[in-house]
Image: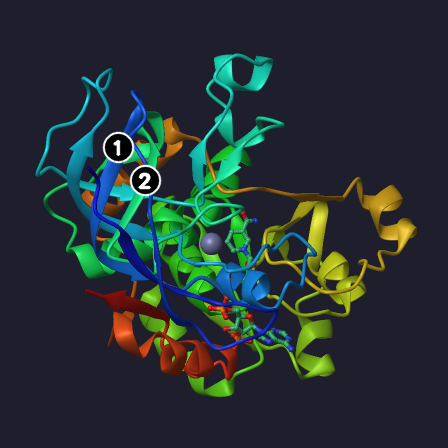
Amino acid sequence: MTSPIQGLAAHAAGAELLPYRYDPGKLGPQEVEIGISHCGICHSDLHLIANDWGLSQYPFIPGHEVIGTVTGLGADVLSLKVGQRVGLGWQSNSCGQCEWCTRGMENLCPVMEGTCLHRNGGYADRVRANARFVIPVPDALPSEQAAPLLCGGITVYTPLRTHGVNPSSRVGVVGIGGLGHIAIQFARVFGAEVTAFSTSAAKEEEARGLGATHFVNSRETKAMREVAGSLDFILSTANADQDWSLYIQALRPTGTLCVVGVPPSPMEIPAFPLIAGVRSVTGSPIGSPYQLREMLDVAARHSVRAMTETFPMAKANEAIEKVKKNKVRYRAVLAN
Ligand code: NAP
Ligand code: ZN
């Protein structure tokens, strides 16, 4: 007999979260059940609550930046122990058979399963996932500051690594929120010189404290024009439409604009600077289990920590409102 899981669910697009209980059924042989201590509030949760992407099914329990301890192990799971501290991010399973899974790029699996996509997520007391996606957390990382790394952290870590950011790189980070404030830190760990682009002038001091050498108020067109041709790699974490031509202009020849934040509209990109300077535009989704392990290890050894504001799980609606208003510095985390 399994006991019901108690969570908080939206029952319609954009609705407030209400207590919601469900029966998780029998634990599958390759599944792990996690007793949740902390769950970060990623902006993707807000997109899903609002059904911005047309993917949401209700009732919907958000949450995919989970830290907790193993409370149940499926019969075939040998890699984890009951009581062990673990993390779970956006992805909870993949087919395990396709080209991408066998290449260790499970985040590109065409049938990947999301922790809170068509399943019940981490704004709850417990959550389940396939054991391959349940990642041990290094002792040096406090749970509250580690939770945001499971989605926000890996989403910025992977493209910085994939695109070979190094001490010669000049990196721009657009949007200094949950993802952006972690991106500044990882880019610094990789040795890059970092420029923070923000609509919030009040974030300048903290952005510099996190490792940015330059700060550009992205609402000022003049300031944006001044950085033309200065950056090798720009990572955009903003969840809003931008004048993308200004960011393309900010790239040096052969530079790359990589989008991880999800703007509502199709992006308008001028062709000439791409052609003349061999500049490119790309995107990146989360990271694989292997990259999650590596990212947590790098964060532990190089003191990368999310700056967090904690809310009791029962105050999730209050925390969500604060995220919507861009008032959280820099990641809201729900605690049980
Ligand atoms: P967040 O904490 O709310 O931060 C987003 C930041 O974007 C804000 O702090 C703000 O920074 C900036 N911003 C907000 N409104 C803006 C506007 N009108 N113009 C320009 N910038 C604006 O959100 P998050 O959790 O970091 O998530 C950011 C985005 O990444 C979301 O769209 C989310 O769905 C997406 N995401 C993608 C992946 C992936 O795998 N690709 C994974 C996780 C999240 P400033 O105040 O500095 O301007
Ligand atoms: Zn996320």
Q: Secondary structure at mark 1?
A: strand
Viewer-proximal residue, 248 or 4?
4
Based on the displayed image, in which of its 4 quarters is residue 264 positioned? bottom right
Q: Which residue is mark 1?
A: 32
Write down which quadrant ligand 1 falls in.
bottom right
Query: Against 150, is 131 above or below?
Result: above
Disc number for residue 126: none
Residue that protrudes farthest toward the right in the picture: 272
Q: Write the residue at 56% across / 19% down.
A: 100
**Which residue in the protein does label 2 denote?**
128
Where's the N terminus, which quadrant? top left
Q: How many marks?
A: 2
Q: Real-space Cα distance between discs 2 and 1?
A: 6 Å
Residue at image position (49%, 12%) is 102
Name the residue type under label 2: Arg
| Direction front: furthest residue | 1
User: Which amino acid is tagged 1?
Assistant: Val
Q: Nearer the viewer, residue 211 or 104?
A: 104
Q: Position of residue 75 (x, y in %)?
A: 21, 18
Image location (x, y in percent) of residue 165: 49, 41
Q: Dots 2 and 1: beta carbons under 8 Å?
A: yes
Q: Quadrant of residue 28?
A: top left
Residue 249 vs residue 145: left or right? right
Q: Is residue 185 above or below residue 104?
A: below
Which structural element holds mark 2? strand
The mark nearer the N terminus, 2 or 1, is: 1
Residue 82 percent location from the top left of the image: 10, 33
